[in-house]
Image (cartoon, grey):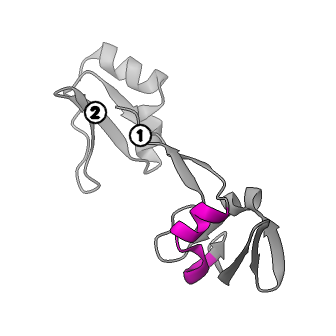
């Protein structure tokens, strides 16, 4: 790694992100690739970045049904909350009603994914 690349990696936060355990990506053959978790980055490419997080919008009734939200265990901050009961205006868990906007505060226990619709894939 030369000094210019080192300066860029420090300036864009890539080295700090690597030290914090975040996923890094490198640009090769026209696309972004993840560094494997069990491999240290070797920094012989020219473009690096921190892997972007996907973005979500809240469920509505139809998308909650298609995601089978009613048949999956829901968690809040890693704590088991139970199964969701769906209605046109939102959902209930353990007797507490939540509107659809609040779906983004919850995750599915089986996958850890956010309760919502992913609207942006990872950019190439």
Between marks 2 and 1 in the image, the one whose residue lies nearer the viewer:
1
Task: Report if residue 63 lies within the magenta region.
Answer: yes
Task: Point out the residue furthest to the left here.
Answer: 29
Of residues 15 and 92, the one nearer the viewer is 92
- Where residue 30 sits, quadrant-wise, is top left
Image coords of residue 36 (percent x, y):
25, 51
What range of the chain is rendered magenta? 61-74
Q: How many dots with numbers?
A: 2
Q: Give the Cα separation between the discs numbered 2 and 1.
A: 13 Å
Magenta segment's dominant SS is helix
Is 79 rendered above or below residue 61?
below
Residue 85 or 20: which is nearer the viewer? 85
Q: Quadrant of the N terminus?
A: top left
Q: How crowded is mark 1: few (under 14 residues within 10 Å), some or many (20 or more)?
A: few
Q: Which residue in the structure is indicated by mark 2? A: 26
Q: How crowded is mark 2: few (under 14 residues within 10 Å), some or many (20 or more)?
A: some
Answer whether residue 6 is magenta in the image.
no
Image point 75% across, 56% down: which residue? 101
Query: Above or below — where is 72 with respect to 29?
Result: below
Which image quarter is the C terminus in?
top left
Q: Which residue lies furthest to the top in this view?
A: 4
Query: In this rendering, is residue 114 above or below 53?
Result: below
Of label 2 and label 1, which has the lower sequence position? 2
Q: Residue 122 carries which label?
A: 1
Secondary structure category for the residue under label 1: loop
Name the spot of residue 65 as percent of width and height, x first: 58, 70
Q: Relative to residue 7, is residue 27 drawn left or right? A: left
């Amino acid at each position: 790694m030369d000094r210019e690349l080192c300066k860029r990696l420090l300036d864009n936060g890539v080295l700090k992100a690597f030290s914090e355990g975040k996923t890094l990506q490198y640009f090769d053959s026209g696309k972004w690739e993840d560094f494997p978790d069990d491999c240290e980055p070797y920094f012989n490419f020219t473009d690096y970045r921190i892997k972007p997080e996907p973005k979500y919008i809240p469920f509505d009734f139809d998308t909650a049904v298609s995601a089978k939200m009613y048949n999956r265990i829901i968690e809040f901050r890693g704590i088991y909350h139970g199964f969701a009961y769906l209605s046109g205006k939102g959902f209930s868990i353990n007797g507490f009603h939540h509107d659809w906007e609040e779906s983004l505060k919850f995750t599915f226990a089986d996958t850890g994914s956010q309760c919502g619709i992913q609207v942006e894939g990872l950019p190439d």
